[in-house]
């Protein structure tokens, strides 16, 4: 990115009208991926000068224990529903979960899910870290996930969505293929990086379950309806050029007993529609790249 | 620019939790628990709260507390409405449905409104300790001495006013310090309701049982915070019950549905019917076992 400039120069402006046609495998019009956040939040993390980890003095009982629900109860509830309807996860992983609760990571791995890094902990923020510190976090992520799962991470979602101006260049330099941190498009797009090639895959804040339940204050049924509407529109527009729909989840939210039933109905709807290519993030980036030559400066295949 | 290196060191990064309060245990791997009847324990918990018109904010101001400059007649009276009217609507609704509930009760409520507490006890309901009054908040910034005194005061006053010994505790806003559970144990509390990380009772290392009172299913979260209608709240409770009953049938393990309601929220004239309809619907379900918090803990502990 261009530091300290009004336009960070992340990408070129590409109007939605008139784009080259992208077709997903099997002629599908929308690539649908599910991104469960498998996280560990520390109960008593060190303070970051720019952001408090918890709203309340430690221990923030509701904040911490709500998130702990994922790792005791709701991960398996959410994962079972996904597996039942044929949705693999592309996991946004607090990599320290590999140490704290390896059973959760092993469950996701056994289901054939893909892992990308969401930092070490979701209570450690990247603002103001040095390049060496940021490299250490990236290298830790690659090593930790490889040791725990045998997989090499291909993507990045910054811990608690905290970045530095170097983040995109660094992850591309380490050979990662995609970022989930940019929200400017409904299709995969190239991002400008110093070296290598980095794709931005649409993640989503707007249909993220956290936004659904605690920004937009939806009921479980309203959120499920939102997912169906999002899908219907993107599936229709994807006839012109393939679109991407991400469903970003947190088990402690979507896996609550009053929400999981309506959510399952939304997954059933999408799976039975016929227009969805249900895939993992890396597969979507690969299929897009196979149809899209690198065009950006610094974006070399 | 760089951050102090301790910000990137992770001393607690190892197997299990980054604390010693309780150990990790995934629900689906635990020995199944069965209830005396049905497969889903339905636990109604009503909070009885008195908000002094003078908030002390030590250590923090409780949700629902005064909001305007003094004197905040609006919020003082709107909250006290729950004790004068809403709680009585709940009692009648519970009686009509034949349901025994828990009442998480400020000591000040028991002292100030003896008629209400007598009616709660006469209805066969359970009293759970819920601090002194709505100024009686706890968090990590409270001194150990002040916290011990607060909990001791709450329990002695509540027990004196009710003529019973409370076994359960709910903190205001479910907010604790790192030492709260130890102080509760010292003072004879068998179960706490604050930690929302599970859907069944489980035991902490110090011996206390945590009976999770899911804040997500409360009228405070769904109606007061998320501003859903009473009908939407009731629909969510029904959806939760259906899911849990299905899970219990599939796994053979009993489940629990905690329903946390507040007299000044769900006890309003235009909302109470949704609560009554929910009770009637759940009462008609064979899978439902209505129980108090203490009843659920006792039944679970006998099988644990």
Image (tube, rainbow, N blue to C red):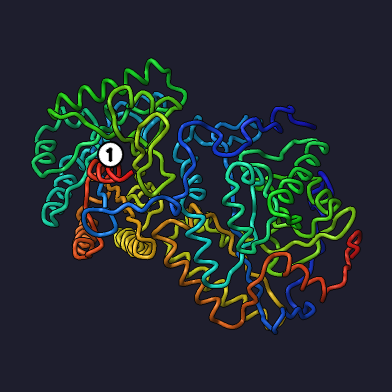
Q: Residue at x 79, y 60 (%)?
A: A177
The residue that mark 1 highlights is: B74
**What chain does mark 1 sit on?**
B
Q: With B257 as the anchor, is A260 left or right in this view?
A: right
* Disc 1 element: helix
Q: Position of residue A29 (x, y in %)?
A: 67, 80
Residue A174 screen position, x and y as percent: 84, 51
Q: Closer to the camera, A277 or B285?
A: B285
The quarter of the picture where residue B189 lies is top left
Q: Position of residue A187 (x, y in %)?
A: 71, 70
Image quadrant containing the C terminus of chain B: top left
**Extreme residue in the top direction:** B145
How crowded is the residue under tag 1: few (<14 C-alpha within 10 Å), some, or many (20+)?
few
The residue drawn where x is 61% and y is 63% is: A89
Identified at 31% across, 50% down, the residue is B258
- Front position in the image: A113 or A224: A113
């Amino acid at each position: 990115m261009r530091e300290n400039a009004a336009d960070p120069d992340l990408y070129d402006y590409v109007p939605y009208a008139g784009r080259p046609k992208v077709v997903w495998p099997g002629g599908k019009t929308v690539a649908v991926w599910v991104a469960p956040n498998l996280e560990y939040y520390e109960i008593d993390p060190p303070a970051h000068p720019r952001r408090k980890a918890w709203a309340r003095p430690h221990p923030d009982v509701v904040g911490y224990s709500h998130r702990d629900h994922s790792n005791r109860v709701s991960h398996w509830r959410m994962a079972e529903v996904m597996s039942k309807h044929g949705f693999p996860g592309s996991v946004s992983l607090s990599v320290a979960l590999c140490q704290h609760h390896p059973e959760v990571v092993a469950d996701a791995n056994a289901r054939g899910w893909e892992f990308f890094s969401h930092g070490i902990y979701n209570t450690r923020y990247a603002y103001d870290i040095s390049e060496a510190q940021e490299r250490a976090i990236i290298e830790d992520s690659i090593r930790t996930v490889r040791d725990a799962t045998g997989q090499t991470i291909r993507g990045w979602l910054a811990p608690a969505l905290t970045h530095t101006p170097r983040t995109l260049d660094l992850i591309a330099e380490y050979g990662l293929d995609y970022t989930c941190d940019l929200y400017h498009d409904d299709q995969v797009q190239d991002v400008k990086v110093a070296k290598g090639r980095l794709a931005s895959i649409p993640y989503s804040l707007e249909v993220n379950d956290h936004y659904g339940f605690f920004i937009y204050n939806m009921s479980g049924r309203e959120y499920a309806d939102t997912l169906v509407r999002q899908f219907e529109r993107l599936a229709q527009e994807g006839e012109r050029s393939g679109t991407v729909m991400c469903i970003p989840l947190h088990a402690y939210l979507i896996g609550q007993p009053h929400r999981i039933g309506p959510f399952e109905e939304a997954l059933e709807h999408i799976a039975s529609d016929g227009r969805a290519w249900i895939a993992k993030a890396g597969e979507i980036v690969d299929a897009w790249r196979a149809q899209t030559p690198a065009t950006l400066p610094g974006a070399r295949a | 620019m760089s951050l102090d290196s301790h910000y990137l060191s992770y001393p607690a990064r190892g197997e299990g939790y980054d604390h010693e309060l309780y150990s990790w245990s995934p629900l689906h791997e635990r020995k199944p628990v069965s209830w005396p009847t049905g497969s889903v324990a339905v636990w109604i918990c009503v909070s009885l709260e008195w908000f002094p018109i003078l908030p002390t904010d030590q250590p923090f101001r409780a949700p629902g507390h005064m909001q305007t400059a003094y004197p905040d007649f609006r919020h003082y009276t709107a909250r006290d409405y729950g004790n004068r009217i809403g709680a009585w609507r709940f009692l009648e609704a519970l009686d009509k449905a034949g349901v025994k509930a828990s009442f998480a009760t400020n000591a000040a409520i028991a002292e100030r409104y003896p008629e209400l507490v007598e009616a709660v006890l006469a209805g066969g309901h359970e009293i759970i300790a819920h601090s002194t009054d709505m100024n009686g908040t706890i968090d990590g910034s409270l001194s150990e001495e002040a916290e011990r005194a607060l909990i001791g005061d709450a329990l002695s006053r509540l027990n004196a006013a009710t003529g019973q010994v409370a076994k359960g505790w709910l903190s205001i806003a479910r907010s604790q310090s790192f030492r709260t559970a130890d102080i509760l144990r010292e003072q004879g509390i068998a179960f706490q309701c604050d930690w929302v990380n599970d859907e069944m009772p489980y035991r902490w290392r110090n011996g206390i049982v945590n009976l999770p009172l899911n804040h997500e299913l409360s009228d405070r979260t769904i109606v007061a915070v998320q501003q859903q209608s009473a009908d939407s709240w009731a629909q969510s409770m029904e959806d939760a019950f259906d899911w849990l009953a299905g899970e219990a049938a599939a796994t053979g393990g009993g489940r629990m549905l905690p329903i946390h309601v507040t007299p000044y929220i769900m006890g309003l004239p235009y909302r109470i019917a949704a609560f009554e309809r929910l009770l009637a619907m759940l009462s008609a379900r064979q899978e439902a076992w209505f129980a108090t918090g203490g009843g659920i803990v006792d039944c679970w502990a006998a099988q644990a």
